[in-house]
Image (cartoon, helix red, strand yellow):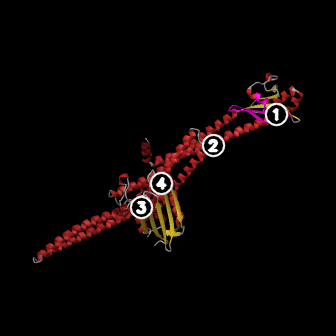
């Protein structure tokens, strides 16, 4: 069932956006409505309690002289005056023996109160008391005093029906606002996905047309963002390949004409003199062989030139975007899991403040990681645009190397927490002039390789340590884990392309080869490896402080 659900959402970016945005809106609005109702409930209950205490205190003060003089008429007038206040069920004045001296319902005057709630007044010391506080009513009592002498009790009961009505109203409005927010989020996600999908369809259609042999056409491009820049770069590449193909075809036609003329000359020479017939035949055979080889070479050159740049671009897109998108998808999955946990706790009414803060903290952390990796994808798309126009352009800038490595590891924090791996970065934080995106890919590949190959799921203390040391012109990054280590045979082939010990588990054998090439060719550094079976692996990367 879970596989079917994943397959359903993975087939459409629109579904992912709509589901993600609506889920976030639903959870956040549910939390907001829940918190609002609770706050409103606490406020109304507190207000009701304060009102009851105030009314019963005023009643006790006003009834002091009437109780002392046993003036039942005056006490009745005081009781009647309080009925003007809203939400009052009844008011009463009793003496110390629980005899009713004045009551909202006159037929109870003169009776003794024998219920269990009223009996509490016979034993309790003088003071403000809440006798009843349930969902329907609140009953408060206050001592009637005369010259510091306790002579009776005043009681007031308030109706809580207005509180329930207000809470229901707040809840209904909150649910309505939540539904509106979810619908708006779905509409926004649909509009955003629609524009994105249309642009991707246009780009894909252009690639299909070019592959099918169509030339001299323009890619539909109405965007001014990164996808628009990518389309512009592809258009330039198509135009360049088309011009090169046309130039090669012209050269082919000229060469074919020259070969034809040369053949005719040789035939004329054969007519003029027979003595050169053997030489002419030999030259003709050699020319025909050379002509066939040249035609074959030209055809291969046309195909290579046609797809070289496109192949590089597609390979770069496939590899460069794989890691940040993988992290973003993992973070999205964690958000989905945390939201499920939060929803389950809310539905089961077991959500505590600590649970709420922990789950929201995890969601915010995963969301931050998703944003960073999506931003990194945007940077990579911009890089692909630049590659399509000038492959020699490099983006080199000066960074604080320890801080930057920590930022890289931060984008992988959700994955590392999931695998229960602890990290530490030690050593110098010096300035290094480098291509940061390449360093990010190197560190990311190393961490991913450790997770896949070094650690098993049964291990409890998984640890990765990065130590940075500084020399005069060089910086050395020592990356080490405490995993299973490598044998001498594996160490000998670890940097070779397509070499892997987990091919049956989906390994491609390209991870460490890519790291090796990035360090040696792109960063101008050196990389070595040392490992012992059962003790872990250390990788030493030596980089120049100033890029060449």
Q: Position of residue 56 (x, y in %)?
A: 79, 34
Question: In this figure, which residue is indicated by the disc labeled 1?
Answer: 143
Q: Position of residue 128 (x, y in %)?
A: 78, 36
Q: CA distance from mark 2 to mark 4?
A: 32 Å
Residue 59 vs residue 111, the one in the foreground:
111
Q: Residues within 10 Å of mark 2 (few under 14, many from 20)?
A: few
The reply to whether residue 536 is in sight is yes
Residue 54 vs residue 489, the one in the foreground:
489
Query: Seen in the image, is 270 located left or right of residue 255?
Result: left
Q: CA distance from mark 4 to mark 3?
A: 30 Å
Most extreme residue toward the left is 274
Q: CA distance from mark 1 to mark 2?
A: 37 Å
Q: Secondary structure at mark 4?
A: helix
Q: Position of residue 396 (x, y in %)?
A: 49, 68
Query: Seen in the image, is 212 located left or right of residue 63?
Result: left
Residue 327: give its label: 4
Question: In this figure, which residue is indicated by the disc labeled 2?
Answer: 35
Q: Earlier in the sequence, mark 1 or mark 4?
A: 1
Please state which of the two labelled residues, at mark 4 or mark 3, is closer to the viewer.
Answer: 3
Determine contact: label 4, label 3, CB under 8 Å.
no
Q: Earlier in the sequence, mark 4 or mark 3?
A: 4
Please state which of the two labelled residues, at mark 3 or mark 1, is closer to the viewer.
Answer: 3
Residue 35 lies in the magenta-colored region: no
Determine contact: label 1, label 4, CB under 8 Å.
no
Q: Which range is magenta? A: 119-145
Q: Secondary structure at mark 1?
A: strand
Q: Earlier in the sequence, mark 3 or mark 1?
A: 1
The reply to whether residue 388 is in sight is no
Question: In this figure, which residue is indicated by the disc labeled 3?
Answer: 532
């Amino acid at each position: 069932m879970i596989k079917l659900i994943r397959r359903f959402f993975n087939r459409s970016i629109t579904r992912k956006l709509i589901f993600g945005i609506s889920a976030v809106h639903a959870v956040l609005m549910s939390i907001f409505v829940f918190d609002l109702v609770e706050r409103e409930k606490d406020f109304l209950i507190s207000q009701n309690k304060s009102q009851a205490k105030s009314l019963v205190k005023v009643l006790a003060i006003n009834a002091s002289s009437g109780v002392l003089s046993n003036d039942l008429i005056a006490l009745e007038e005081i009781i009647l005056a309080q009925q003007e206040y809203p939400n009052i069920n009844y008011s009463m004045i009793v003496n110390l023996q629980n005899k009713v001296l004045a009551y909202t319902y006159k037929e109870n005057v003169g009776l003794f109160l024998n219920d269990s709630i009223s009996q509490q007044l016979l034993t309790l010391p003088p003071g403000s008391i809440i006798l009843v506080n349930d969902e329907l009513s609140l009953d408060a009592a206050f001592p009637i005093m005369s010259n510091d002498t306790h002579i009776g009790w005043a009681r007031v009961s308030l109706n809580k029906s207005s509180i329930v009505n207000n809470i229901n109203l707040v809840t209904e409005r909150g649910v309505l606002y939540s539904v509106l927010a979810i619908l708006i989020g779905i509409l926004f996600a649909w509009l955003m996905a629609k524009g994105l999908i249309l642009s991707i369809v246009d780009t894909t259609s252009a690639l299909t047309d070019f592959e099918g042999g169509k030339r001299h056409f323009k890619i539909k491009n109405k965007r001014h963002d990164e996808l628009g820049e990518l389309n512009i770069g592809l258009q330039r590449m198509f135009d360049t390949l088309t011009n090169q193909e046309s130039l090669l075809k012209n050269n082919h036609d000229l060469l074919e004409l020259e070969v034809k003329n040369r053949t005719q000359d040789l035939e004329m020479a054969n007519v003029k003199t027979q003595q050169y017939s053997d030489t002419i035949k030999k030259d003709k055979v050699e020319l025909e062989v050379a002509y066939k080889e040249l035609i074959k070479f030209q055809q291969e050159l046309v195909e290579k030139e046609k797809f070289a740049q496109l192949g590089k671009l597609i390979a770069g897109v496939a590899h460069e975007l794989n890691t940040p998108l993988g992290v973003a998808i993992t973070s999205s999955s964690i958000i989905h899991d945390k939201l499920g946990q939060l929803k389950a706790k809310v539905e089961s009414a077991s959500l505590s403040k600590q649970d709420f803060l922990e789950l929201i903290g995890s969601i915010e952390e995963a969301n931050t990681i998703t944003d960073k990796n999506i931003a990194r994808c945007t940077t990579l798309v911009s890089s692909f645009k630049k590659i399509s126009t000038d492959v020699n352009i490099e983006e080199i800038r000066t960074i604080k190397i320890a801080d930057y490595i920590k930022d890289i590891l931060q984008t992988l924090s959700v994955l590392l927490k999931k695998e229960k791996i602890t990290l530490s970065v030690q050593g110098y934080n010096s300035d290094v002039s480098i291509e940061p995106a390449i360093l990010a890919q190197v560190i990311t590949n190393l961490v991913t390789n450790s997770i896949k190959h070094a650690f098993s799921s049964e291990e409890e203390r998984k640890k990765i340590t990065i130590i940075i040391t500084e020399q005069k012109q060089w910086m050395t990054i020592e990356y080490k884990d405490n995993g299973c280590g490598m044998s001498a045979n594996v160490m000998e082939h670890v940097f070779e392309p397509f070499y892997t010990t987990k091919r049956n588990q989906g390994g491609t054998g390209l991870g460490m080869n890519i790291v090796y090439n990035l360090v040696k060719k792109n960063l101008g550094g050196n990389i070595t490896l040392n490992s012992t079976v059962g003790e872990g692996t250390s990788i030493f990367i030596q980089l120049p402080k100033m890029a060449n």
